[in-house]
């Protein structure tokens, strides 16, 4: 009887081995699984303006902070009020980040004490003003006057008064101080 059991065990082991060989050698069925790379998040578009060296639109990676937006826009100008904003705040897509200025509007000297001649309207024409005329404006020194003239030379006449804020170093604070003293009209 032992021989009968040995024969049964032998047949079972043979069937099991044959099944394993069949399963391991047959071609795969179905569609193979492919792994795609993880999706990358779209950059955040922010508008940085005010007292920064290079105001404009910038793309920042998700998770960026206001500090990162200030750095990518060239950093603070000398009159920036960095303490008035939260540099640790997270930026959001489409956000405008306004960097305020410490410098308050300076009073405009009366026309009689202003050594530079101005048009009859009393306003300085941004598209024709000389360096001396531009320097007669509050908060516009020689460096900013040169940048205004260089910008005008490179890009053509200003199309709007607000376009002066595209000149590096002129933010909303300086614009607010001079907007009532400038024009684009002919004298």
Image (spheres, grey):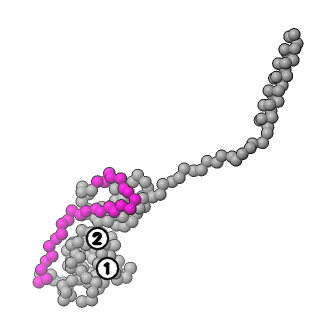
User: In this rendering, is residue 12 above or below 156?
Assistant: above
Residue 116 location, x and y as percent? 18, 84
Residue count near mark 1 (Cα–Cα under 10 Å), binned few <14, some 14–19, many ≥20? few
Question: Split into 4 quadrants, where in the image is the C terminus?
Answer: bottom left
Residue count near mark 2 (Cα–Cα under 10 Å), binned few <14, some 14–19, many ≥20? many
Res 29 → quadrant: top right
Residue 85 location, x and y as percent? 27, 56
Element type at marker 1? loop
Q: Which residue is mark 1?
A: 160
Q: Can residue 108 be seen?
A: yes
- Residue at 23% x, 76% y: name it: 179
Q: Which residue is mark 2?
A: 170
Q: Can residue 132 be seen?
A: no
Residue 69 location, x and y as percent? 36, 59
Residue 42 location, x and y as percent? 47, 57
Query: What separation in Å lies between label 1 and label 2 (alpha carbons)?
Result: 14 Å
Question: Split into 4 quadrants, where in the image is the N terminus?
Answer: top right
> Is residue 96 in the magenta section?
yes
Q: Front-most of 176 and 10?
A: 10
> Is residue 111 in the magenta section?
yes
User: In this rendering, is residue 132 above or below 171?
Assistant: below
| 130 relative to 42 in the view: left or right | left
Res 20 → quadrant: top right
Q: Which residues are magenta?
A: 86-112
Answer with mark 1 or mark 2, whichever residue precedes in sequence: 1
| 14 relative to 173 in the view: left or right | right
């Amino acid at each position: 009887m032992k021989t009968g059991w040995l024969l049964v065990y032998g047949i079972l082991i043979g069937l099991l081995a044959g099944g394993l060989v069949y399963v391991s050698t047959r071609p795969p069925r179905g569609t193979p699984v492919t792994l795609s790379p993880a999706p990358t998040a779209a950059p955040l578009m922010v508008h940085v303006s005010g007292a920064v060296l290079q105001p404009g639109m910038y793309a920042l990676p998700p998770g960026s902070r206001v500090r990162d937006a200030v750095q990518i826009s060239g950093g603070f100008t000398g009159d920036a009020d960095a303490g008035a904003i939260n540099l640790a705040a997270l930026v959001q897509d489409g956000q405008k980040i306004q960097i305020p200025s410490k410098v308050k509007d300076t009073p405009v000297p009366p026309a009689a004490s202003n050594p530079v001649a101005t048009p009859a309207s009393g306003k300085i024409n941004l598209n024709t003003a000389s360096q001396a005329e531009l320097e007669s404006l509050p908060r516009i020194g020689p460096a900013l006057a040169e940048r205004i003239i260089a910008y005008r030379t490179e890009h053509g006449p200003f199309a709007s008064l607000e376009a002066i804020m595209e000149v590096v170093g002129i933010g909303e604070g300086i614009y607010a101080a001079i907007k009532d003293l400038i024009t684009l009209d002919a004298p």
